[in-house]
Image: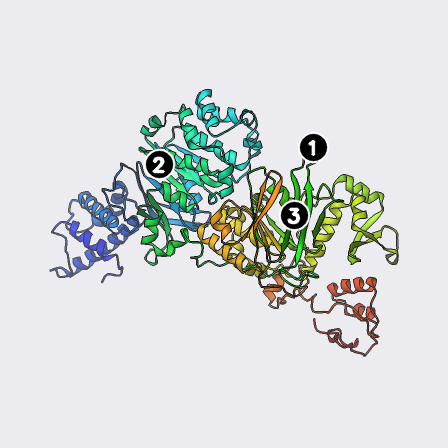
Amino acid sequence: MVYLEPPQQLLQLLRASLPDKVPASSSSSDPIDDEESAEILAYVATLAATLSSTSSFEADEWRDALEPYLSALPSFTNGDCKACIDAFRDESQALLASHDESSDEEDAFGGEQITDIRFSLAYGGKILLHQTKLRLRRGHVYALVGQNGVGKTTLMNAINNGKLEGWPADLTTEYVDSGSNVDPVHEAKNVFKHLSESTGRADKQCRDILEKLKFTDAMMEGTIGELSGGWQMKLRLAKAVLIDADILLLEIRWTMMTTHYNLLTLTFTFLEMLPKTNINLNNMQTNKSHKSSDEPTNHLDSKTVKWLEDYLMGLKETTVLIVSHDTQFLETVCSDVIHYEQRATWGPHRKLVHYSGRMSAFVKKQPQAKHYFELATTDLKFVFPDPGRLDGIRTSTQRFLEMEGVNYRYPGNDKDTLTDINLKMTLSSRVVLIGANGAGKTTLVKMIVGDTQPSNPSTCRFFIHHNLRIAYVSQHAFYHVEQHIEDSPVSYIQWRFKEGFDKEKIESEAYRITPEEQKAIDDYNLEGIWSRRLRGGVLEYEIKKKNVREKDNIYVSKDELLAMGFKHLLRQTDEKIAAKEAGLDLRPVTTSEIQRHLDDFGLAQEFGTYGKIRGLSGGQKVKLVLAAAMWNCPHLLVLDEPTNYLDREALGALSAALNEWGGAVLMISHNKEFYSSVCSEEWLVADGKVTVVGDSSEREMKAVAKKKAFDKEKTEDEVKDSAGGNINSNGDKYKDATTNFWGQTVSKKEARQYDKAKKKMDVPLMRKILQIPAGKIMPGYEELGDGNTVPAK
């Protein structure tokens, strides 16, 4: 009786490899020998299946594993079964190759094969690829594509570090990534010296290629950290061209579809560049090389991208591997596609599947991947919370921002950066800012978000609604998130919002109180700002001074407080009041509540609750940044290059969510396909002026209550989750105090005392403040009881 059930195909191959003397079936003159032989063969076939599943086909390994069992068969009287094992191993390897569904490539597709390996890849405790095959040919340009989080960058890093199982040891690598991580030591290096030392090339060659890329003498003599992201990317590309490496990894983090404005203002051209080069590209192409690219058009202008395209397509003896979200770039340069796929027959893990042909050919073979060409074709969905109501704003076309005749000049400059700016925004606004680097786009955004003020306040009109909540997602938002890389996304949001306001924003440089301002606060004997009111069109703040009774508090106008130097204190106060208007003081920061919010941005529980920020891909970090920015239900979302790191599917989801959302959108983007799907209004920034093109049409007013109410967490586990958060599990069951038992309005002091008692659930004190007689129940406050019995908590 055979107890094991080995793979039948391997068992048949094993029987076919045995000498004729070995029983092939259970019909034999000696039933005992037949049964024992069948059991041995079943066990050996099972061992062979295990070795095959791990792509272990070393002759010694198979002999060591199988020989002790096969040698016990009656036919191997001399114990020598090595020839049988070798034949069985060869047939098993051929069988595995015949079942390989990871390629549609024909053997005669062209090009010398430089790698043909099978490997598994994991990050932390997560298996990204399991027993997948990677075969590369010389002269081919491969696009490595897949959703955010599948492990594209991890694979590129493994190739760069030579950590893939079976990877040829004689291949060297050069990695050109998007430079999202800030390295102070690297950024302190001199540009020209770094290029010369890291490539080993002559100074003339280094200078020639930098000049081709339009580096000035000042930029060459400066530090890497002084370069913008685009120029740092060009420097890395220059290094990659100069180094005679086998493997080049290029990583493009966002799509480069330059606007008509950029095309008019760019001066660098590929045709100008070619005659000046002293780099013999033909010689470089004849070297044995395998170059891989990881997101190169991240920070590149259109002419530099054109140069890169021509360079890559001109490589005849070089293999190129590219990770990019720029479909048109891939369509232009790539000859093959390597796609991360998951199929039912493969179990829970993904494999790499090779498709010959360009991206368009790949999409024809896999129609579900058409989102690479169409933003709208995606199953992924983002859900943005509706913005809270703004006082006095009753329609989506009423203005919350107005700028008339606004100028801005940086301190110490003798010329305005922006002049005579006339703009407006409403909840219906969908605006894209377009302009060359240095034109003043970021300067304008900083004025809108409140970081700076006009240089001519007395001669211009500059109005921003005092309760406007703004979510600003900048290009460098990763910096803040990566200060918490050992925390989970849920823990990060808990830390940021547990006090009922955005702690990260309050601690930022734009809000931080300077020593000079703190001295002014101390000299004024200021204890704090307790409230704010709008009176006669003027914002006034309730000032509490030290050693002064509450009833003697005074109201001071915003302009007066700014004149006293309390700029950052006022910004903190306004931010906290706006957060309270959004209901952040009531919103629970429990694990379940935050994970529900993360689910709306496509960050599953596996990553949001149980994973660490360190393990998130670039696209997943963008989703986290967006989710955190939208936690306070903003009225205006400002996006600086929002397409960074997001794959095509996520871009489609973001576009759809922005079109459904009820707030205003202001974005800086070079991706015309993306911004044109959202924005109908363009602000063109050039020569210190802003020209408005188009208009945002009226949209549905999607306002919610002034202060949002949230469902209480009722289960024991959810109550435990709230420990350390900004709420008491039952603290919001009691109403706020407005009038006492006798119908008299409670004073501000009594209201604050009541609020403190409510948080402590001190029912006797709450009854005392409301002046409820013993034995009486106050209508509307039944939860406080009659004073004789202890109410249920």
Instruction: Report if the CB atoms under discs 2 and 3 are less than 8 Å apart.
Output: no
Can residue 318 be seen here? yes
Q: Can you give x and y, in whole percent of width and height, for residue 570 in the image?
A: 75, 49
Residue type indicated by callout 2? Met
Query: Which badge, 2 or 3, is on the more N-terminal residue?
Result: 2
Quadrant placement of the C terminus: bottom right
Q: Nearer the viewer, residue 141 or 694?
A: 694
Residue assigned mark 3: 422
Quadrant placement of the N terminus: bottom left
Residue at horizontal 38%, vertical 32%? 172
Secondary structure beneath dot 3 equals strand
Quadrant of the image occupied by residue 784: bottom right
Separation (CA) of disc 1 from disc 2: 48 Å
Q: Can you give x and y, in whole percent of width and height, for residue 578 in the image?
A: 69, 56
Residue 514: mark: none
Q: Nearer the viewer, residue 236 or 716?
A: 236
Quadrant of the image occupied by residue 426: bottom right
Separation (CA) of disc 2 from disc 3: 46 Å
Q: Nearer the viewer, mark 1 or mark 2?
A: 1
Secondary structure beneath dot 1 equals loop
Q: Can you give x and y, in whole percent of width and height, for residue 345 in the image?
A: 32, 57
Residue 414: mark: 1
Left or right: residue 752 versus residue 362 is: right
Residue type indicated by callout 1? Asp
From this view, report whether residue 301 is shown above or below residue 31.
above
Q: Crowdedness of circle 1 by 10 Å Cα count: few (<14), some, many (20+)? A: few
Residue assigned mark 2: 313
Q: Nearer the viewer, mark 2 or mark 3?
A: 3
Left or right: residue 294 versus residue 78 is: right
